[in-house]
Amino acid sequence: MSFPDKEKRQKCWDSRDRYWECLDKSGDQIEKCVEVRTLYETTCPSQWVKHFDRKREYLKFKERINEGKVAEGSRGKVDELKLVKRIKPKMTVGPLVTEITCTFIVAASILYRYGDWFRHHLIVTLSVLIAWYFSFLIIFILPLDVTSTAYRQCIQEHTSFIEELQLNDTANASTTAVPHVIPSNETSVCKLPWSYVPENVLPQLWRVLYWTSQFLTWFVLPLMQSYTKAGDFTVKGKLRSSLIDNAIYYGSYLVIATILLIYLAAKPDFEFDWPKLKAIAASASNTWGLFWLVLLLGYGLVDIPRSVWRSAIPGPLLSRLYFKAAKLNAEKSEAEENLEDYLEALQVALNRIPPSDPLRKNAETISDKLPLEWRERMKRKSVNTNQMNDSDLNEKSLVRLHRQVIRALQRQHRTETQWHNLVEKIFDLEDVHRNIGSHEHYFKPSFESSRPNWVAWIRSPTIEWYWKCLLRRYVSQGLAMILALLSVLVVWSELTFFNASPVLSIFAIFVNLAKEYYDYLSIELVSIATIAYMCVCAYSTVLKIRVLNLYYLAPHHQTDEYSLIFSGMLLCRLTPPMCLNFLGLIHMDSHIIKARLMETYYTQIMGHMDVLPIISDGFNIYFPMAILGLCLATYFSLGARFLTFIGFQQFVDDEDDITADLSDEGKELIKREKRRRQRAEDNESRRRNVEVASSSSRAERVRETGGLLVKRESSRSELFGSTSDNMSNEDDRYDQLFMQASRRIGDDVGSTPATSVTGSSDYRSSYTRSGPPRNFFDDV
């Protein structure tokens, strides 16, 4: 059977769909669909018309069998008939197993970098790992589903029907015409994808991934998040507090679900069953995720390329970071003061509660959670024990104090980590800004960092200068242009993906073109890159929103359990609707473009967002168009200007006096931090020099005066009756006093001792005279 070009084929399919729709509405009365039939026969070749008629007859016959309108005697024979009889393709397990394994390694590596496997609870680590792993699997396996669906669609389009058989109906001695199906010669044109997955694998995999992640994000992880910040001292009490804490959370969703069910029950053509309830739950979760996804993408699609572009030029970026340092320092000071207030109350409780009181153990439990530095600071601080009455010291007040201390510690740890990372970033940018004009092409950092030998050999100062001062700028600008182009493509596709003819979505055009040439690898690569970029834009936005500043993912095992659990919840909630939105962008969701397409296994299991007409007709189509408005607002910094107008100072490009003052304040704070670190390094260097000089002088003294020293020791032993052990102890005590004095002089005066040792038994030390102490009041 010959096939016309793509345009004519699409017109033929459209006319066929209209004709079939007319037959469905009229009850298969052909006389009521004469005009549509005429257009159908005019548009499609005669062979196609005969092929489609027999296909419809076959599908109607199977429908009658499923409805029980055909006797059981013929059912077995008809079930053996397949729409396409072809050799079953062999499963290529390599790509699927490789993706599953590599995704697990990626998820575990990221969790190891940000979390602390040895300090965090095992259940928290495993739950977050499963949440991250399953979310990443959805992203990386969805392209395999897309290519598999494209292959199955191709096979279906190249199927032909050539004859009919008569099947005897043994139940009622009647005959029924059933189209017999044999393979067409055209099936050879459909090339098998290199990563083809059999039809029975993906549905089961999607079912496990989706419902497990949904159970984690809506039930397990919220309870664990509340459990980590509960102030109770027993497991039972923590569970009760977490349930109470989530009661309002779950209650609001229960009210919404009840209203939704009442609305659906009022519809006359709606019937409740288990598949319908699962579809409603999936639709509600996907709609919630789509709502937040649009808000987050509207900011991230502009901010990510702009941040990469700004990182190429250190000068203007330093002003922005100085401003951020001033605000973060104020927040850090506030967090420390807040923690000190709670620790003062804890110290009062420890002083007032006697050791025999059962509440003493609870108070010590709170104290054990404090880092050693804060515990020592609490003990050194004098408190007024009369500020708390004995009636206030009860289990309920200690539970409240415990909860407050946990939250204060989380906030203090978050701000401390943010401050450390920001200072390191500013120091690096200042070094780059200072070394750009170097004619030696040799990078000189302000502070030397310890590196392994192989890293120091690869990352030599010359290579570091060429990368940081020359190449990184152009690489960052080129990457920013690519990301900006990708953002424009995403926004344009979001605005036009609902238009099925003509196809305006860039991603849909690319996928359709790749289908024509059976370029499945390009489809998978573009799909993974697009979904991953949308994920980065959405997830990074959450960590930058000032309202959600309770959460922070810090590298080097510095992220707390609360933030890790929140990140797992976020991934599980946003990934499924994001992938469903991507299928709409490439026109693989038939419920959006209103066309007869083969469903992906992803949409078969996770459903569509079209249970309610208000969702399917308006929200899913027109709400993503709001991304354009949010992107424009982000580009012109309307949000930052509005917050600055109402009193929450933000950094804007056209700096005002307050912004300039905060930038100058942040610059002074960074200078103070740099001087503090330089003094610490100088003091450490002086201590090492003193220790080396002391050990070397003592060894040389023993070597030069060994015989005389033994003689004098023997004479002293004879005169004063002291043993050699006493002399050794006396000599050790002298060396200890000498070291302590050297350290004090080195710390207070800043001079380096120059020790002179003679051959006599008198130990004398001389110090070079230096000027008065410097930099005493730099921090004032």
Image (spheres, rainbow, N blue to C red):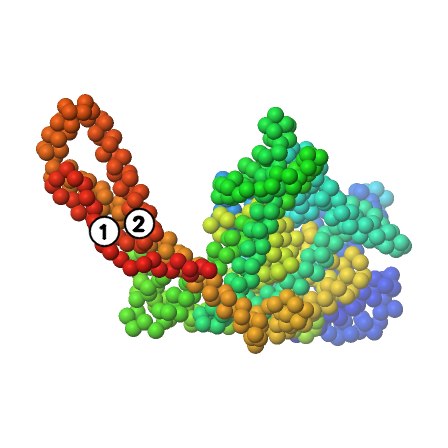
Above or below, 553 against 640 in this view is above
Q: For this view, does 507 lie left or right of residue 744?
A: right
Which of the labelled discs sits on residue 722, or is there none? none
**Amino acid tagged 1:** Tyr
Residue 40: percent from the left, percent from the top?
76, 71
Q: For this view, does 273 lie left or right of residue 494?
A: right
Quadrant holding the N terminus: bottom right
What residue is drawn where x is 13% and y is 43%?
A: 758
Badge 1 is on which residue?
767
Q: Is residue 268 visible?
A: yes
Above or below, 13 against 414 in this view is below
Residue contact at pointers 2 and 1, CB within 8 angstroms: yes
Badge 2 is on which residue?
745
**Amino acid tagged 2:** Ile
Label 1 packing within 10 angstroms: few (<14), some (14-19), many (20+): few
Q: Earlier in the sequence, mark 2 or mark 1?
A: 2
Q: Is residue 139 visible?
A: no
Is label 1 in a helix, a strand or a loop? strand
Label 2 packing within 10 angstroms: few (<14), some (14-19), many (20+): some
What residue is drawn where x is 69% and y is 66%?
A: 624
Q: Determine the CA span between mark 2 and mark 1.
A: 10 Å
Residue 625: percent from the left, percent from the top?
69, 69
